[in-house]
Amino acid sequence: MGMTMTQKILAAHAGLESVKAGQLIMANLDMVLGNDITSPVAINEFYKNGFDSVFDKDKISLVMDHFVPNKDIKAAQQCKQCRTFAKCFSITNYYDVGDMGIEHALLPEKGLVGPGECIIGADSHTCTYGALGAFSTGVGSTDMAAGMATGKAWFKVPSAIRFRLVGKLNPMVSGKDVILHIIGMIGVDGALYRSMEFSGEGLASLSMDDRLCMANMAIEAGAKNGIFEVDQVTLDYVKDRVNRPFTVYSADEDAEYDEEYVIDLSAIEPTVACPHLPENTKMARELSEIVPDQVVIGSCTNGRLSDMKAAAEIMQGKHIAKGVRCIVIPATQTIYKECIKRGYIDTFIDAGCVVSTPTCGPCLGGYMGILAEDEIAVATTNRNFVGRMGHITSKIYLASPEVAAATAIVGKICDPRDLK
Amino acid sequence: MNVNGRIHKYDDNVDTDVIIPARYLNTADHKELASHCMEDIDADFTKKVKAGDIMVGGANFGCGSSREHAPIAIKHSGISCVIAKTFARIFFRNAINIGLAILECPEASERIENGDEVSVDFDTGVITNLTKNETYQAEPFPEFIKDIIRADGLMNSIGKR
């Protein structure tokens, strides 16, 4: 029996000819990631168990992104602990205020993750790197600690669901709409314990930013990982970024899938996930009575350059509606600088938005945009759970940058194609 | 190994943001995390819970973020075991890795009610509802995972000590 893309990568990293779904394996890791929230727990575990060396100082990434610049004394202490650890073990890829970015935008941008690699990260959205054809999955801090010490992690080999993409996205529709549509279709546990494998001729029309956004939200369908077939778009993206040999794995023709869905990209419309689960999807047009107090454009899901471009083009020459607070957060310093160069930051500020240094801040209700009682947010982030962005009675609608920007302008949830 | 306790029951899709809200993630202190456990969906949980009590959820328990703070908060609140129809995969992994006992059992998840007194035998996977006088069979762990649990968590199983 053939193997899926994920199974092939796992087999190669476990030193096995082949693996099958359900098999328990020990795999070698190409990258172990942690942030300022999850790394302190991992570092405590690492020392508690008497480790005094890391498996490879070049294959660990520590990114201070959740509560930085530090939101309070406790957050500062946590970053200090990470900084000390990174210094002690000469961690090459330690990113702090000044050169940090939101981890899942930063690692692909820096070429720290590449096709065919096996990556774990103590952050659930580590599944983002599947966009590059890597096996990449979120784990907890203990797995991160064990990974830093040994360079290995245990996995149960997942089965897979195949999403065959056909057609082409319409203008003002992006990867966010596709993944929200899919989560709405299969549910928040629709891919539980399994891989979501994306392939088909429709891939060619999806930019790398679209793919990173889609793979990022595989976890919101419960998936172990999301993974995209490698094509010219991938190779163009990693060229000049990934300066080490990598292997491109394709699924076998006789690979077995639990389920297969055909997704017609040309049929996808601007889609919004209503409170309090990402599966509660509706068309943006159906939600025109929803009046947001705050709009957030950014995050590891939608803080990339094409997201900023989409929002800026919609806001160009316009002003956001009275009563709306709009927070824009470019995900990395490189993206931020490019936004300045292209005039997007001027556009945002002239439109009445506030622009922040890269941070996860508001997405997880950390800081930089906490919601008050009964307030409503439209956000390009990834989760709309109870209390996620603030008060437990606040509500979050998840949307694309196009929908979020149009919504900020109109003051009500809006299909960007209806914006005059 | 057996545990016995009163049930705290919740619905489907209990996410890690309600188990331990991110506003408390500026600490890794187990006791402090436990003091905020479940507060956004069950404000009185920390007052009601007694050592040994058991938590029951529906499908996809622990979905959302990878924060290990979530199983840590549950474990240090005194909960001896979590039973659910299904667990989100990162939570499942984290619970095993930190030594919080968890069992998947759709029947138990459906039948057990808030306040029931329940005992669990981890060797056999038998869950006994003492209030309703019923038993349910949970899927026992594979050997590989039992090894991690016997070593009291992943770090001990690979540890230098």
Image (cartoon, rainbow, N blue to C red):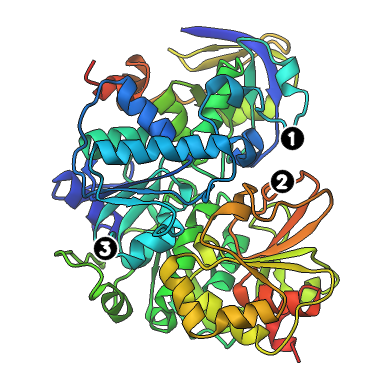
Q: Are dots 2 and 1 on a single chain?
A: no
Helix, strand or loop at mark 2: loop
The chain letter for the residue carrying disc 1 is: B
Task: List the residue tagged with mark 3.
Answer: A114
The picture quadrant where one finds residue A416 is bottom right
**Chain where mark 3 sits:** A
Q: Is residue A357 above or below residue A209?
A: above
Q: Quadrant of residue A267?
A: bottom right
Do the dots labelled 3 and 1 sit on one chain? no
- Location of the C terminus of chain B by quadrant is top left
User: Which amino acid, mark 3?
Assistant: Gly
Query: If you read the primary sequence from the N terminus, does the residue marked by circle 2 or circle 3 appear first?
Result: 3
Q: Secondary structure at mark 1?
A: loop
- Name above or below for residue A288 compared with residue B24: below
Specify few, some or many for label 3: CA neighbours under 10 Å numbering under 14, 14-19, or 20 or more.
Answer: many
Which amino acid does the dot numbered 1 rest on? Answer: Ile
**x, y percent for residue A117:** 24, 57
The residue to which callout 1 is attached is B41
Residue A153 visible? The answer is: no
Q: Position of residue A369 (x, y in %)?
A: 68, 56
Left or right, A259 with reference to A32 = right
Residue plotted at (58% across, 34% down): B85
The residue depicted at 43 percent of the width and 84 percent of the height is A205
Instruction: Using the numbered discs, state the Cα–Cα distance from disc 3 to disc 1 in whole angstroms.
Output: 40 Å
Q: Is residue A405 left or right of residue A300?
A: right
In the figure, A217 relative to B128: above or below?
below
Dot 2 and dot 3 within a common chain:
yes
Residue at point 61% right, 74% down?
A401
